[in-house]
Amino acid sequence: MKITNLGTSKQASFYVATTLYKQMLQKKESKLGLATGGTMIEMYEALVTLLNNNRLDVSQVETFNLDEYIGLEADHPASYHQYMNHILFNQYEGFDPAKRHLPNGVAENPEREAARYEALLDERGPVDIQILGIGQNGHIGFNEPGTPFDSVTHRVDLTESTIEANSRYFDDKADVPKQAISMGLRSIMKAKRIILLAFGAHKKEAITQLAAGHITTDVPATILHLHPNVEVYVDDAAMPELS
């Protein structure tokens, strides 16, 4: 694992957007694991610009999102379905809706839906590039501290710190769902290549713990040390101060 400081979030986001663009250019049937959240906004904006400037054919690209809130309809403004529509799929309409995959947050049986999504990943995968952010407590996807490393797609109880961090996307903190369906840690590790982005001083401690190299379920992201092809890109503020 290499942690690279690209100076600013804009520069790092453009670099990763270019990486995704090149992947889709070189392999028309690329399978991309996508993430949501504030960290990803500049990356998707840069990717949309590249796609629109070059009119790349992405009709055969297949996407798999990490997670979705339990209890939110796909058309809810705070759902990850709507996040992806707003920031990518409605900005570049070449992606085939049948090849855009997210968990169903209003499935009658969340456990059965998690199993369906995991089976889909196994059937259609492996993912060529998995994009990740990292929570302040070291979570990736919605895999909170203590999540077993052998976890597959599952129902997750969100921690108070994660609920607080995500409350900015809701009118009231009380409206933030308390559960989600998320790819598990083993699910994420099936990807051929993993790219993690972290920006801002509030992510510095999580990146410092990741950089220290101690693999523990207390910091779920540390499982990435067991993957052979992981890149981490940060800005100045998130760069760990390690000897």
Image: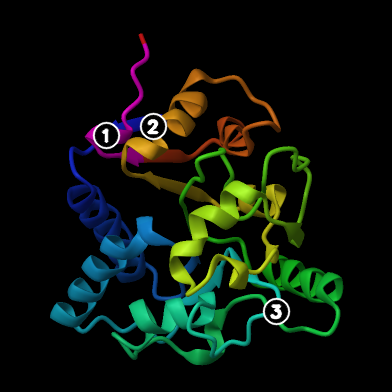
Q: Where is residue 146 drawn, in percent x and y?
A: 75, 38
| 101 sits to left or right of 18 | right
**Residue 36 visible:** no
The residue pinned by badge 3 equals 71
**Residue 220, horizontal then vertical, whole percent:** 63, 38
Q: Is residue 103 above or below residue 94?
A: above
Q: Residue furthest top?
A: 243
Q: Which residue is mark 2?
A: 204
Q: CA distance from mark 2 to mark 3?
A: 32 Å
Verify whether residue 202 appears in magenta. no
| Residue 140 located left or right of residue 32 | right
Q: Secondary structure at mark 2?
A: helix
Q: Residue at x 46, y 75 (%)?
A: 29
Label placed on residue 237:
1
Q: Quadrant of the N terminus?
A: top left
| Residue 240 included in the magenta stretch of the image | yes
Query: Disc 2 or 3, which lies upstream in sequence?
Result: 3
Q: Give the amino acid type for the residue marked by disc 2 in the picture.
A: Lys
User: What's the distance in space between the residues labelled 1 and 3, CA to CA?
Assistant: 35 Å
Task: Indicate left or right for 156 with 82 as reference.
Answer: right
> Which residue lies at the image location 39% right of the left edge and 30% below the top edge?
2
Q: Which residues are magenta?
A: 233-242
Evaluate if marks 1 and 2 touch, with contact meaning CB atoms under 8 Å apart. Answer: yes
| Crowd tier of the residue under label 1, counting other residues whose Cα lies within 10 Å: few below 14, some 14–19, many 20 or above | some
Residue at disc 3, secondary structure: loop
Instruction: Name the N-terminal-most of marks 1 and 2.
Output: 2
